[in-house]
């Protein structure tokens, strides 16, 4: 095999061949590549949005719940978690399933009610651990001194649309009073201070009051039903759990957000599977496109191939020259494609994220996606170029020259 | 002898086998310019293809420069064609993407000759075929005769022992044909190039040393 001669022929064919074919081929390769990255990235973005919703609004990265034989966690060790390197927030909650009632006309004739989860928060801790305080769509978030104030999710308030609106209180406004009957049968009235919308169904069906208020209702002090922990990065939760255990939580249940989001996890896997299937189809289409381009080129150059063989060029050198052409199309397609993705499509979606039911979705372009797409397209080009070149050069010299 | 052909046979298989060559025997001396002539279907092109190792005979021996090529592998044939044999086909046998200069130095590049040497040699060869001013022209920018002269230069660049030409003037006008044949004659006289040419033009006899007449796969006569 003569690499220099193969490169020479490939180069001359590319620069002196049909410009229209060259542009069209590169355009197809570019679009095939953009398609590969875009599909993977958009599904990655959806999965990321779902995961972030759960992390930012419900679970943080790690959730501690009481040991099997306990109702509460004792908070005496909680502060030690804050000192674990990489932990950025710790927020302890009381959780109570309560009946919330709303009498819009205050005449007792049309009372709307339902059972929802009420959590208590230490406001400053909670602001660091979750994004609920940033998701207020009416009114304001709680302050630590609030005692008769409540913040409710839009699926409790009602009037904001969505699948669960029919189960809501029917349109609670800021300043309205709601009555709450806690599961220990204590009843209190709260003024709605804020309504939030996170786009996470579970979060939007919750209500929040302050820790002090909940402790007064439950008659407990310095305990919690759950502790959520936010860490600086995703993916290393297991390491943090070991450190949390060592800091004194020997019997409590400690789980990662992934373990708690069973449905979401399977949805993520489904999206990942769809992404892989579409990626494989896209790669095959790109490979077939290159195959057709090289095949047509070989059919048109049948006589030239015969002449090259007649003057002593080895079949392997001719094959290599066609494969080099195919790889050139793929490399240029990748370079143009990555430029379009990074400088056009990605900035566009950063500025204009897609409004999905799971949240705002942008492209999640990772090094892995780029690496896999690059390899996929190169392999597709290699195979798509190799097969027709191999078949084309196997023809006898005389058949190739004289047909 | 540069070529010795012994009992060469070529049969094309099929429902009815075609005996294209039937026990052909002849010899070619170094520096001879030979024309293979005969009617269409006489076997002259088939014979040239066997001699040029472009096809494999059914039986017989082809001894070129003292080497019996009959049992050559595909790789050996390739190597032999590159280093020992040159070909000129009918018109339009150039790669459309290569200039005259590039077409000519391609065989040297395949032989692994350094760039500075193959460009120098290709320029000399272009001068020899009278196309120095056309060195950067693509085939589509040259006449049929000029293209054929480039093909001749390409065939000779590796200094082959034998130059095979398969109806090299078939697609050329009379003026270009004459130029090409005169070039063959000049190369034959000046550098002693052995040339075996298939032609159907009776007038071409005046350029060659010997004519081998074929009919129905057999040599019927030899002479000028």
Image (cartoon, rainbow, N blue to C red):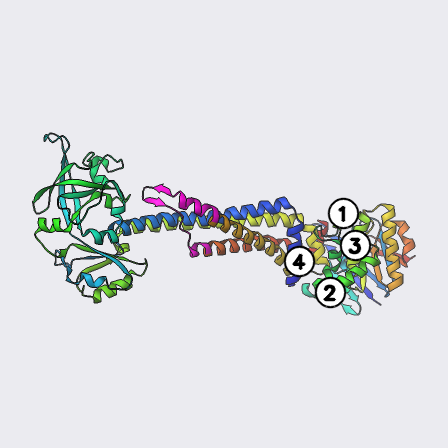
Foreground mark, 3 or 2, reads 2
Q: Is residue B1 visible?
A: yes
Residue that badge 1 annotates: B141
Is A356 a magenta residue?
A: yes
Q: Is the C-beta separation of discs 3 and 4 under 8 Å?
A: no
Residue that badge 4 annotates: A8
Q: Is residue B47 visible?
A: no
Which corner quadrant of the image does residue A227 belong to?
A: bottom left
Foreground mark, 2 or 4, reads 2
Residue that badge 2 annotates: B116
Q: Quadrant of the N terminus of chain B?
A: bottom right
The range drawn in magenta is A343-370
- The chain that hosts pointer 4 is A
Q: Quadrant of the C terminus of chain B?
A: bottom right
Q: Is the C-beta separation of discs 1 and 2 under 8 Å?
A: no
Pointers 2 and 4 within a single chain? no
- The chain that hosts pointer 3 is B
- The chain that hosts pointer 1 is B
- The residues tagged by marks 3 and 4 sit, at their Cα atoms, a distance apart of 19 Å
């Amino acid at each position: 095999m003569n690499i220099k001669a193969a490169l020479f022929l490939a180069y001359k064919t590319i620069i002196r061949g049909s410009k229209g074919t060259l542009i069209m081929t590169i355009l197809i390769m570019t679009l095939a590549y953009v398609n590969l990255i875009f599909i993977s990235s958009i599904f990655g973005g959806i999965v990321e949005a779902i995961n972030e919703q759960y992390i930012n609004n419900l679970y943080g990265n790690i959730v501690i719940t009481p040991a099997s034989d306990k109702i509460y966690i004792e908070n005496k060790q909680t502060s030690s978690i804050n000192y674990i390197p990489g932990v950025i927030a710790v927020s302890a909650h009381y959780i109570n399933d309560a009946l919330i009632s709303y009498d819009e006309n205050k005449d007792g004739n049309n009372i709307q009610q339902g059972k929802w989860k009420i959590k208590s928060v230490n406001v400053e801790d909670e602001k660091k651990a979750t994004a609920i305080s940033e998701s207020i769509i009416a009114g304001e978030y709680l302050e630590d001194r609030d005692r008769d104030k409540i913040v409710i999710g839009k699926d409790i308030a009602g009037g904001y649309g969505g699948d669960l609106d029919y189960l809501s209180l029917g349109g609670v406004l800021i300043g309205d009073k709601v009555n709450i009957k806690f599961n220990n049968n204590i009843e209190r009235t709260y003024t709605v201070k804020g309504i939030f919308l996170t786009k996470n169904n579970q979060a939007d069906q919750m209500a929040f009051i302050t820790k002090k208020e909940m402790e007064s209702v439950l008659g407990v002090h310095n305990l919690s039903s759950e502790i959520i922990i936010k860490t600086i990065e995703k993916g290393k939760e297991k390491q943090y759990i070991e450190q949390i255990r060592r800091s004194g939580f020997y019997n409590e249940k400690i789980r990662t957000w992934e373990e708690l989001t069973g449905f979401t996890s399977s949805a993520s896997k489904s999206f990942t599977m769809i992404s892989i299937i579409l990626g494989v189809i896209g790669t095959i289409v790109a490979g077939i496109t290159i195959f057709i381009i090289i095949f047509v080129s070989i059919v048109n150059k049948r006589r030239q191939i015969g002449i090259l063989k007649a003057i002593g060029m080895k079949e392997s050198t001719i094959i290599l020259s066609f494969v080099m052409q195919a790889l050139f199309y793929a490399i240029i397609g990748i370079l143009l494609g990555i430029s379009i993705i990074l400088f056009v499509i990605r900035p566009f979606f950063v500025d204009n994220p897609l409004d999905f039911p799971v949240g705002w979705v942008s492209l999640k372009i990772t090094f892995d996606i780029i690496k896999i797409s690059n390899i996929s397209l190169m392999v597709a080009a290699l195979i798509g170029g190799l097969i027709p070149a191999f078949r084309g050069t196997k023809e006898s010299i005389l058949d190739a020259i004289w047909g | 002898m540069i070529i010795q052909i012994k009992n060469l046979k070529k049969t094309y298989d099929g429902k009815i086998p075609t005996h294209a060559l039937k026990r052909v025997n002849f010899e070619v001396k170094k520096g001879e310019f030979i024309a293979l002539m005969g009617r269409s279907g006489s076997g002259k092109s088939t014979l040239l293809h066997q001699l040029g190792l472009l096809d494999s005979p059914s039986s017989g021996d082809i001894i070129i420069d003292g080497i019996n090529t009959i049992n050559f592998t595909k790789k050996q044939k390739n190597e032999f064609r590159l280093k020992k044999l040159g070909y000129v086909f009918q018109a339009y046998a150039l790669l459309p993407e290569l200039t005259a200069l590039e077409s000519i130095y391609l065989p040297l590049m395949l032989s692994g000759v350094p760039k500075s040497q193959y460009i120098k040699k290709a320029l000399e060869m272009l001068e020899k075929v009278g196309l120095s001013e056309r060195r950067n022209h693509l085939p589509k920018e040259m006449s049929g005769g000029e293209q054929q002269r480039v093909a001749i230069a390409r065939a000779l660049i590796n200094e082959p022992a034998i130059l095979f030409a398969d109806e090299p003037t078939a697609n050329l006008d009379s003026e270009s044909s004459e130029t090409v044949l005169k070039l063959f004659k000049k190369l034959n006289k000046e550098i002693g190039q052995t040339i075996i040419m298939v032609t159907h033009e009776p007038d071409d006899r005046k350029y060659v040393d010997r004519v081998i007449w074929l009919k129905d796969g057999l040599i019927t006569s030899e002479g000028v």
